[in-house]
Amino acid sequence: MLSRAKNFLLEIIFPIHCVGCGGEGEWLCENCAHKIQLNSQQFCPVCWQANLGGRICARCSSPLDGLRVAASYQKNPELAHAIQTLKYKFSEPLAANLAAILARSISSKNYQAERIVVPIPLHKKRLRWRGFNQAELLARFVSSKLNLPFAHGLVRTKNTAQQAKLSRAERIRNLAAAFELAPDFSPQGKTILLVDDVASTGTTLIEAAKILKQNGAREVWGLVLARK
Ligand SMILES: [Zn+2]
Ligand SMILES: [Zn+2]
């Protein structure tokens, strides 16, 4: 709450400019959000071989059935900037515009079954320090844009060290048992859309998917803005 109030005051003193066009009033205006080029190709979330829809390839196995990466960091510097901004600023308009990019990247795909949008949670200590979870902001807007139910399906039980600084093997060890199913949530027979801002190696999404699958989820897909 405190960080929200602080952001609000800062925005009055230092006006916000769009990271794309420099226009005043928004971090990423709708116009610039629309110019972001969506990935035409997706990748297997385990071996990262290119494929069409992002479904896990026949050679690999994982509790994560597929991953949609909306756009490329390299090709869209304004997206990279916007993602970075959302990490540190609680901005609902920015989250809404980024969520529209996420929604665009999967709206062409036909999903059957009941889908539920679930954010990758932050540990409560990190949440208290940061004031909000950017993945949750994105997931809430994705759920309203796609007209799908939202759920806090997972709880982060371990305050994991910064993943970016670790090797792949260390990341997996670091994330083991990092998630738990949220009380009162049942993914039984459901297709879960796990939302995060970015994916790097995919281990966070895979660890989260493992818990959902152990509790009966039919399919688990990841949905992220970009791959770091
Ligand atoms: Zn703009
Ligand atoms: Zn693969």
Image (cartoon, rainbow, N blue to C red):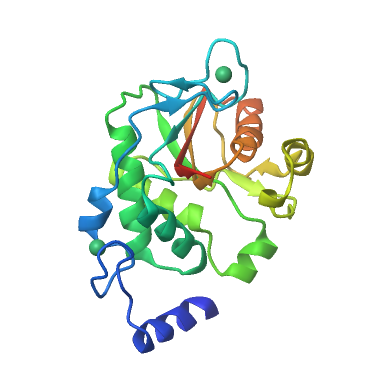
From the top left corner, tell me how far across and down residue 24 is, in percent.
25, 75
Q: Quadrant of ligand 2?
A: top right
Q: Position of residue 65 (x, y in %)?
A: 52, 23
Q: Residue at x 30, y 67 (%)?
A: 18
Foreground: 75 or 226? 75
- In the drawing, does residue 98 fall left or right of residue 130? left
User: Which residue: 50% across, 52% down?
Assistant: 135
Foreground residue among 155 and 222:
222
Give the image quarter of residue 211: top right
Task: Count how many numbered circles sit on residues in the image.
Answer: 0
Q: In the visual, does 143 lie left or right of 200?
A: left
Residue drawn 42% across and 60% down? 81
Q: x%, y% of residue 226?
A: 45, 43
At 59% from the left edge and 43% from the top edge, which residue is drawn? 184
As drawn, which residue projects farthest toward the front? 74
Instruction: Give whichever of 18, 215 is nearer the camera.
Output: 18
Name the residue furthest left.
31
Residue 122 seen: yes
- In percent of width and height, residue 107 lies at 28, 33
User: Is 15 above or below relative to 99?
Assistant: below
Q: Is residue 147 visible?
A: no
